[in-house]
Image (spheres, coloured by chain):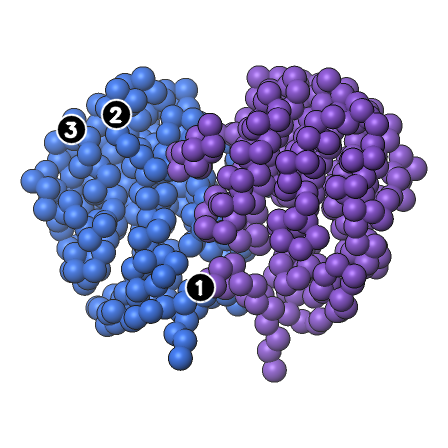
Chain colours: A blue, B purple
Amino acid sequence: MELWYTEEWTDNVRFSIKVDKHLFSDKSDFQQVDVFESKEFGKFLTLDGLMMVNYKDEFIYHDMIVHTPMATNMNIKNVLVIGGGDGGTVRELTRYPQIEKIDMVEIDKMVVDVSRKYIDICACKLNDERVNLYYEDGVAFVKNSKDASYDLIIVDSTDPIGPGEGLFSVDFYNDCYRILTTEGILVNQNESPYFDFNAKEMKRANEKINKIFPIAKVYQAHIPTYPSGHWLFGFASKKFDPVKDQNKDSWEKLNLKTKYYNSDIHKGAFMLPQYVKDMLDENK
Amino acid sequence: MELWYTEEWTDNVRFSIKVDKHLFSDKSDFQQVDVFESKEFGKFLTLDGLMMVNYKDEFIYHDMIVHTPMATNMNIKNVLVIGGGDGGTVRELTRYPQIEKIDMVEIDKMVVDVSRKYIDICACKLNDERVNLYYEDGVAFVKNSKDASYDLIIVDSTDPIGPGEGLFSVDFYNDCYRILTTEGILVNQNESPYFDFNAKEMKRANEKINKIFPIAKVYQAHIPTYPSGHWLFGFASKKFDPVKDQNKDSWEKLNLKTKYYNSDIHKGAFMLPQYVKDMLDENK
């Protein structure tokens, strides 16, 4: 007998992983939560049938969503993470001694509980004393937060369908802008430019952010287990340009060992293929 | 009824495409040749069950394998293409007025014939008057070529299994070095760093080239229809460094419209993730 996990990247494209064991399966108040064990990717967590993290390549996503803003402004002290229930984003943040507070707002407690049990590679720093966990809706949380509370907001969300939908709205981005300090940075997972569904959402999110933040750029990473493997992040900010203001020397002095991020790829990630640039230019 | 084309990226990972029609299927003297029609990727050509080119994203591979060396040395006049039977590499080369001669050596005439019939998007310039087609073994062709015959050699090969195997050998790379001019550049498709099989071949090829050429670098592109979507190219040269010697202004003056390549990504493509750098450093 063979067991295969199959993800529908589009109606016409499938990505399948041979599975040794289906370790967990349950429906939370928000979504279907599953954990599998596989030879190629080790353990992996899926939400509503979409890959979130796996042991083989979670480092790519978490490196790029955390170190890119952190190496741009080395004075980030207060961080808000929206989503990111697996804990990987928090894990990377806790490596910075200058960070004083990390508020993590995950709507679905089951994702955190399951990650703590099965995805220890990501969840291992959720008990860091600087971390405050809130099981709340991220949209409401930012609405109720005071002005200028955070130096960095990381939106580590699912796709804009289901529980992640509000995290792609104008109201949400406006609140993010308001609760960021004058040096504030917003980073979000920004879908992919390749398949039509993801590309449409990528453009929509970027269009909204562009109208609110004076600096709004897009950067990319090779994440083979997300649809097409070509994944994008949004970098929006009130003051810092991620390339011009890259604080290479200070970041390198921290001597953090990383497997994907480095000072070169910090710059290279913002150098986009022409067709992606053209898509983003349609928004201007 | 549904028809699905499935590619085994590893023993434990599959990539599947919903197919409208199986347009062509035959076994040549060298390999299994198939052409399919699909909604997501349009028509696509496979060799021995591996994706070669498709209408949706062939531009990525061909842009990166051609424009990267061409924008490094704007005086390239004589070019040798090994493999590349679909014609996409030749098509991009014919856009440069300064190129005087393109020798294309494809071992398998069936690939060229089939591409002419079904993959016109790639094969459309094979009749350019500067193109000379040789249906021969690339290894023998370079062995029998005179010293300093070419300014650029592009190895547009399949994986190092089957007919492509000799194109990853030390003897072949030595002959390439010998038949290149003192300003000569060798570019090769260099597999992927992600799955073990491809990564091993990537390291082996790079190790060999490193010992022969004074300048040997690796660059990357997002090619979603190749295993992992993270694909690499090798850039080896006797004189030119692809980043330091990038001839941005002259290339941009040509006013070539490209969909993936641009002057930014020329640089960004050489900025590699840390784990890829570490793999390549093992070779030094």
**Residue at left 19%, top 34%?**
A95
Per the image, label 3 sits on a secondary structure element best described as loop
Q: Nearer the viewer, residue A152 or B96?
A: B96
**Residue at left 66%, top 62%?**
B48
Q: Could you say which quadrant of the image residue B187 lies in?
A: top right
Give me the disc on residue A97. Answer: 3
* Quadrant of the frame with the N terminus of chain B: bottom right
Residue denoted by label 2: A255
Q: Amino acid at mark 3?
A: Pro
Between disc 1 and disc 2, the foreground one is: 1
Residues at marks 1 and 3 on the same chain? no
Give the mark nearest the N terminus, 3 or 2. Answer: 3
**Residue at left 49%, top 45%?**
B200
Relative to B21, say whether A44 is above or below.
above
Per the image, label 2 sits on a secondary structure element best described as loop
Chain containing the residue with disc 2: A
Q: Nearer the viewer, residue B79 or B148?
A: B148
**Residue at left 29%, top 37%?**
A66
Left or right: A118 in relation to A131:
right
Relative to A212, say whether A61 is above or below.
below
Residue denoted by label 1: B12
Number of marks in picture? 3
Residue A173 pos. (x, y %): 32, 42
Q: Amino acid at mark 1?
A: Asn
Left or right: A252 in relation to B156:
left
Relative to A272, say whether A135 is above or below.
below
Q: Residue furthest left?
A: A129
Chain containing the residue with disc 1: B
Q: Are marks 3 and 2 in contact (CB under 8 Å)?
A: no
Relative to A2, say whether A259 is above or below.
above
